[in-house]
Amino acid sequence: MKEYRIKPGSKLNLNKVNPEDTGAYKKNGEGKAKAKAATAEFIARLGGLQERLYANATRALLIVLQGMDTSGKDSTIKHVMSGVNPQGCRVATFKTPTSLELAHDFLWRVHREVPPKGHIGIFNRSHYEDVLITQVHGLISDKQVQQRFDQIKEFEELLHESGTVVLKFFLHISKEEQRERLEERIRDPEKRWKFNVGDLEERKRWDEYMTAFEDVVSATSTDHAPWYVVPANRKWYRDLVVADTVVVALEDMKLKRPPAPEDVDFDKLKII
């Protein structure tokens, strides 16, 4: 999945990234079935890797999910993280800042949600909202945008140096796909609770958001906190890309099984 990783210093052009892409898997039923089977294997491996991460308590993993409304942030968490132990995993969502949060710097509320060592943290939206939305709506100047890019990179470098692996995913869907998903929410009574009229207003700014995402990803994809632009029109392929990348990141930590207590002779130990 390295092809979806944005190299530091490169300029992202989302027009050249096909949200319908499914890699080596054909878009027919056979390709979908193979991708789902591969995803299931990654999810099974993820469970064991998370247990070792938790047992060692020396490293942490932070997963950042960004994307337009309906891009699949919630369902990615639901499916990809279905095999992990909830005790070692926490999801944080960042909505409109409260008055208390606005009284601090924009990273204050974010740093509080960073996963402790031994845990996986998932940001469903993140500190990048404070650059994306504010930029699109003209709430901060171009100079402030650049300052925040620098501050975010320094923040993520601090996390990296403290033992936290940072993975950032932009779930890339087409405008037409978003329209279909919004219409599905309207038609299906079971999904209407997800519908927000404000989503339609933000949709009108689609092109502005695409430009903002290009700027954000281009400016903040680094070796220690890379961005992955994930083709997300096909939900089954989106899940595969994210699951594969997360498993590889955990395996790259090369976490060993913690040693057993030295003062216990397990061969002679008997439980009465």
Image: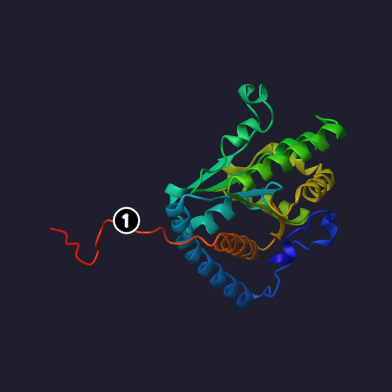
Q: In which quarter of the image is residue 199?
A: top right
Kind of residue at badge 1: Pro
Residue 194 at what x, y percent from top left? 60, 43
Q: How crowded is mark 1: few (under 14 residues within 10 Å), some or many (20 or more)?
A: few
For numbered disc 1, what is the local secondary structure?
loop
Residue 248 at what x, y percent from top left? 59, 64
Q: In which quarter of the image is residue 3?
A: bottom right
Q: In this view, does 51 lie to the left or right of 97?
A: left
What residue is drawn where x is 63% and y is 46%? Answer: 161
Q: Which of 99 and 266 is in front in this view?
A: 266
Count numbered badges in the picture. Answer: 1
Residue 100 at what x, y percent from top left? 61, 22
Q: Which of 28 and 137 is in front in this view?
A: 137
What residue is drawn where x is 54% and y is 58%? Answer: 80
Q: Tell me the quadrant of the picture where the N terminus can be found.
A: bottom right
Q: In this view, does 164 lie to the left or right of 181?
A: left
Residue reaching furthest to the front: 263
Residue reaching furthest to the bottom: 30
Q: Name the residue under label 1.
A: 261
Q: Tell me the quadrant of the picture where the C terminus can be found.
A: bottom left
Residue 141 at what x, y percent from top left? 85, 31
Question: Can I make out residue 241 in this image?
Answer: yes
Q: Is residue 237 left or right of residue 142?
A: left
What residue is drawn where x is 48% and y is 55%? Answer: 53
Question: Can I make out residue 128 in this image?
Answer: no
